[in-house]
Amino acid sequence: MSLLNEISNPDSDLKKKASRIRYINLTIIKEIIRFWNESNDSIWNSSNPQQVLDELGEDAEEILEIDKEILNLLSNILGGRRQSELDSIIAKISTRPQISTDSNGNTKII
């Protein structure tokens, strides 16, 4: 038998699959956190967040709605598992100004 012919080992294949599933799930969470931080910081750490919201126009309302859903997801996943990361996210949220959205979907800082 040639060294170039791979022999399948079911136990090894299962370990590889399990390892890959663990990696994928951890990476999904890390990427969600990374992208959430980038989006949050792009708006709220801007020198003028209102200008960013104005540039987003009607999309700002939807972006902020999606933001809430992502925060719910992260809260459910991170709470009790990676509490310090969740606490860091909550700290960022607590510094945000209050906002309002008019009937046209434009978002204003109050």
Image (cartoon, rainbow, N blue to C red):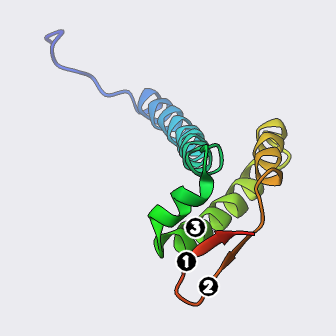
Which image quarter is the C terminus in? bottom right
Front in this rendered view, residue 104 or 68: 104
Residue identified by numbered label 2: 102
Q: CA distance from mark 2 to mark 3?
A: 18 Å
Q: CA distance from mark 1 to mark 2?
A: 6 Å
C-beta proximity under 8 Å, tags 1 and 2: yes
Mark 3: which secondary structure?
Answer: helix
Note whether 13 is above or below 103 in the view shown.
Answer: above
Residue identified by numbered label 3: 66
Labelled disc at residue 68 = none
Q: Residue furthest top?
A: 3
Residue identified by numbered label 1: 106
C-beta proximity under 8 Å, tags 2 and 3: no
Q: Count residues near mark 2 (Cα–Cα under 10 Å), then give few for <14, some for 14-19, many for 20+.
A: few
Residue 15 drawn at (x, y percent): 50, 30
Residue 75 drawn at (x, y percent): 76, 55
Q: Residue furthest bottom?
A: 103
At horizontal 54% and vertical 58% (from top left) the residue drawn is 51
Relative to 108, 1 lies left or right: left
The amino acid at mark 2 is Asp
At horizontal 55% and vertical 49% (from top left) the residue drawn is 39
Q: Earlier in the sequence, mark 1 or mark 3?
A: 3
Q: Count residues near mark 3 (Cα–Cα under 10 Å), then give few for <14, some for 14-19, many for 20+.
A: few
Closer to the eye: label 2 or 3? 2
Which image quarter is the N terminus in? top left
The amino acid at mark 3 is Ile
Mark 1: which secondary structure?
Answer: loop
C-beta proximity under 8 Å, tags 1 and 3: no
Mark 2: which secondary structure?
Answer: loop
Residue 73 drawn at (x, y percent): 68, 60
Note whether 17 is above or below 76 in the view shown.
Answer: above
